[in-house]
Image: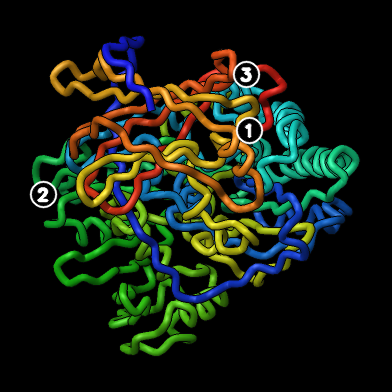
C-alpha cells in the first residue's frame, strides 16, 4: 500500500456522530426455507405497507408468484429508521429518528431534512433512493415518484447478475401510506407488482436464471388521519416544565420529527414515573411505558391498570411481577404471574392479544439495547390521535393526510414478509428477519470498506465484496479526516492512501461466498477521536469509476471490527450501475 502525505481536500460539513458497538443475542431458531439457495435473490423492502393491505392485494390477483405473507412484527416505537436498523441487523443507532434528544449534550440534535431524506441506520442496501429533494417531491405529489423509483431499481438489478443477494428499499410507499391511505397503497402495489413481473422476466431472458424475490414491509399504518394531541396543558397543570434542556427534576422534553401515533418524553429519573402516570390519564393515551432504573423493572400503565415486569438478559426470559387493576396488554390470561417465562412463550402468548411481542418490544425500546438515547417515557396513542411537528403539519396542508404509525398496537406494528420461493413462520419479529435469508450472513457480508483494530493497537483496512464487485476496479484511494473540536469542523489536512487491487482478488470476489482482504495502515487513528473516511475507486487508466464516503464515526476501543457504512456521492455512467 502506498501512502501519499500532505494531501489537502475540500471543506466538509461539521457533524458530530457516535458509533457504539453492540452484540444482539438470539434465543429461538428460525430456519430458512429457500427452494434453491444458489439462485439470485432480490430482497426488496417496502416501507409502511400493512399486512392487511398486502393480503387484500393478493386476493385481488396481485403478486401471484408470491407465497401468502407472514406477519412481520416491528420494534417499538414503530418508526421506519429504527425498524429497518433492526430488520437489517445493523449496529446500534443513536435514536429512533434522525432528530432526537442527546443525553450527553442535553439538547435536541440532528436536522429535520435528514429525517426527510437521510436514514440514520447504516447503508446496508444496494439500492435506496434517499435524496432529500426526491422525498420532498414525493410528499408534494403524494408519492407520484414510485414509477421512476421502480424503473431505476430495475435498471440496477438488470445491469449485472451481481451481487447474488441484492438488497433494495422503496421508501415512497411510506409517503403514500401517510398521504393517500389504503387507496393509494393499492395503486402503488399494482405498479410494484407489474414492475417485479417485468424484472423477473427480463432477468430470466438476459441471464438464463430465475430471480428469487422476497418482500419485507417494516410496519403497518393506521390508515386514518387523527387529531394532534396537546401535551402543554396537562404538563403545566402537574407542575412539569416543557423545555429544550433538562436542568431540574420538573423539566420535560417532548419532541416529534413527524406526525406519529407515538409520543416520546425525556425527563430525569426523579419524577419519571409520576410523568408516566400523569400521561396515562389522558383520553388520547392507550398505554404508557417507562423503565424504573432503581428497581430494574418496566412499567406498562393505562387507564385500566398497571403491569410491572422484569427481563433476564442472559436467559432471555420475562417475569410479570405485579398487576394492579386490569391488564393493559391482555397477557395475564395467557401467562402466569411471578414465574420466569422464555421469550418464545411470551411471543406465542402475545400474538393472541392486540399487542404482539409486546414485552420484548417495550424492553428493547426503553433501554440501550438497540438505541443509544432511548426515551424516558413512551406514550402509545389511541387510534385517531397523533403527535406532530410544525414542518410536517405544513406539508400535510398541501396534499392532505391519511394515516400514520408509531404505536404499540397490532394494526400499526404488523408488516409483511413474503417470497416467491420462501415460506416463513406465521409471525416473524423484526429482529429475526435477517436469519431467514438463505445463504446470507449479515455478519460476514462486509461493507465496502471496514476498519479493524487489532489487539496490539494496529489498524487494518478491510476491503469487502461490494467494493471488489465494482466493474473495472484497479485501485482505491482513501483518506482519513480528523474532526477538530475547537473549530467544530473536520480538518482540511489528512493522509491519502492508495491500494492496488490485483485481478486475482477481483475474480475471486463473486464465486458465491463473501470475499475480502485486509491491509495494515501505517498510521493508526487514536482512540476516541472523531473521523470520516472518503474513497475514490479508479480503473486501470486512473479514471474515477466510483466515490464513497462514510458517515461521521468515533473510533472506540478494540471490540472486534467496526463497519463503516459507505454512501454513494455521485452518479457514475450507466455501465457502472450494477454495484450501487
Image coords of residue 465 (percent x, y): 55, 41
Check disc 3: other Cα within 10 Å, few if <14, some if 14-19, many if 20+: some
Check disc 2: other Cα within 10 Å, few if <14, some if 14-19, many if 20+: some
**Mark 3 vs mark 1: which is more N-terminal?**
3
Disc 2 versus disc 3: distance between alpha carbons?
Answer: 54 Å
**Mark 2 vs mark 3: which is more N-terminal?**
2
Q: Indicate the secondary structure of the residue bearing disc 1.
A: loop
Front residue of 142 and 458: 458
The circle drawn on residue 572 is 3
Q: Indicate the secondary structure of the residue bearing disc 2.
A: loop
In this figure, which residue is indicated by the disc labeled 2?
249
Question: Who's the residue at 25% across and 71% down the image?
Answer: 297
In this figure, which residue is indicated by the disc labeled 1?
579
Front residue of 323 and 547: 547
Image coords of residue 530 (percent x, y): 24, 31
**Mark 1 vs mark 2: which is more N-terminal?**
2
Question: Who's the residue at 62% across and 18% down the image?
Answer: 572
Amino acid at each position: 500500500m502506498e501512502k501519499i502525505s500532505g494531501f489537502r481536500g475540500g471543506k466538509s460539513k461539521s457533524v458530530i456522530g457516535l458509533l457504539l458497538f453492540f452484540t444482539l443475542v438470539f434465543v429461538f431458531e428460525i430456519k430458512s426455507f429457500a427452494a434453491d439457495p444458489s439462485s439470485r435473490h432480490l430482497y426488496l423492502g417496502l416501507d409502511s405497507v400493512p399486512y392487511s393491505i398486502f393480503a387484500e392485494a393478493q386476493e385481488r390477483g396481485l403478486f401471484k408468484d408470491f407465497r401468502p405473507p407472514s406477519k412481520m412484527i416491528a420494534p417499538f416505537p414503530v418508526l421506519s429508521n429504527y425498524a429497518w436498523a433492526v430488520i437489517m441487523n445493523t449496529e446500534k443507532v443513536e435514536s429512533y429518528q434522525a432528530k432526537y434528544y442527546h443525553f450527553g449534550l442535553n439538547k435536541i440534535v440532528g436536522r429535520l431534512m435528514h429525517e426527510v431524506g437521510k436514514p440514520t441506520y447504516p447503508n446496508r442496501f444496494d439500492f435506496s433512493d434517499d435524496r432529500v429533494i426526491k422525498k420532498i417531491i414525493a410528499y408534494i405529489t403524494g408519492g407520484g415518484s414510485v414509477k421512476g423509483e421502480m424503473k431505476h431499481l430495475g435498471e440496477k438489478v438488470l445491469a449485472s447478475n451481481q451481487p447474488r443477494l441484492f438488497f433494495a428499499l422503496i421508501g415512497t410507499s411510506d409517503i403514500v401510506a401517510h398521504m393517500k391511505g389504503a387507496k393509494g397503497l393499492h395503486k402503488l402495489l399494482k405498479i410494484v407488482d407489474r414492475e417485479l413481473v417485468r424484472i423477473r422476466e427480463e432477468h430470466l431472458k438476459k441471464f438464463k436464471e430465475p430471480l428469487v424475490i422476497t418482500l419485507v414491509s417494516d410496519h403497518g399504518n393506521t390508515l386514518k388521519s387523527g387529531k394532534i394531541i396537546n401535551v402543554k396543558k396537562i404538563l403545566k397543570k402537574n407542575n412539569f416544565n416543557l423545555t429544550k434542556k433538562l436542568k431540574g427534576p420538573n423539566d420535560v422534553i417532548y419532541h416529534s420529527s413527524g406526525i406519529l401515533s407515538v409520543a416520546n418524553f425525556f425527563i430525569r429519573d426523579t419524577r419519571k414515573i409520576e410523568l408516566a402516570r400523569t400521561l396515562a390519564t389522558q383520553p388520547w393515551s392507550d398505554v404508557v411505558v417507562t423503565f424504573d432504573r432503581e428497581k430494574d423493572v418496566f412499567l406498562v400503565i393505562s387507564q385500566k391498570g398497571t403491569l410491572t415486569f422484569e427481563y433476564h438478559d442472559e436467559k432471555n426470559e420475562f417475569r410479570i411481577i405485579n398487576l394492579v387493576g386490569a391488564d393493559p396488554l391482555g397477557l395475564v390470561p395467557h401467562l402466569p404471574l411471578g414465574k420466569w417465562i422464555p421469550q418464545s412463550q411470551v411471543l406465542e402468548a402475545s400474538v393472541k392479544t392486540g399487542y404482539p411481542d409486546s414485552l420484548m418490544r417495550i424492553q428493547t425500546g426503553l433501554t440501550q439495547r438497540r438505541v443509544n438515547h432511548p426515551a424516558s417515557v413512551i406514550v402509545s396513542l389511541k387510534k385517531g390521535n397523533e403527535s406532530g411537528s410544525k414542518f410536517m403539519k405544513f406539508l400535510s396542508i398541501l396534499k392532505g393526510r391519511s394515516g400514520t404509525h408509531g404505536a404499540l398496537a397490532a394494526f400499526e406494528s404488523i408488516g409483511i414478509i413474503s417470497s416467491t420461493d420462501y415460506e416463513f413462520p406465521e409471525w416473524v419479529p423484526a429482529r429475526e428477519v435477517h436469519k431467514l435469508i438463505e445463504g446470507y450472513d449479515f455478519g460476514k457480508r462486509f461493507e465496502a470498506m471496514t476498519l479493524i483494530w487489532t489487539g496490539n493497537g494496529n489498524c487494518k483496512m478491510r476491503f469487502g465484496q461490494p467494493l471488489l464487485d465494482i466493474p473495472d476496479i484497479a485501485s482505491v484511494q482513501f483518506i482519513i479526516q480528523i474532526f477538530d473540536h475547537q473549530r467544530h469542523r473536520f480538518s482540511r489536512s489528512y493522509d491519502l492512501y492508495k491500494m492496488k487491487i490485483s485481478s486475482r482478488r477481483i475474480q475471486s470476489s463473486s464465486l458465491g461466498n463473501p470475499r475480502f482482504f485486509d491491509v495494515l495502515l501505517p498510521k493508526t487513528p487514536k482512540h476516541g477521536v472523531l473521523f470520516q473516511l472518503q474513497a475514490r475507486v479508479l480503473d486501470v487508466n486512473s479514471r474515477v469509476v466510483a466515490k464513497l464516503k462514510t458517515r461521521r464515526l468515533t473510533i472506540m476501543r478494540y471490540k472486534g471490527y467496526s463497519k463503516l457504512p459507505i454512501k454513494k456521492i455521485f452518479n457514475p455512467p450507466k455501465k457502472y450501475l450494477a454495484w450501487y
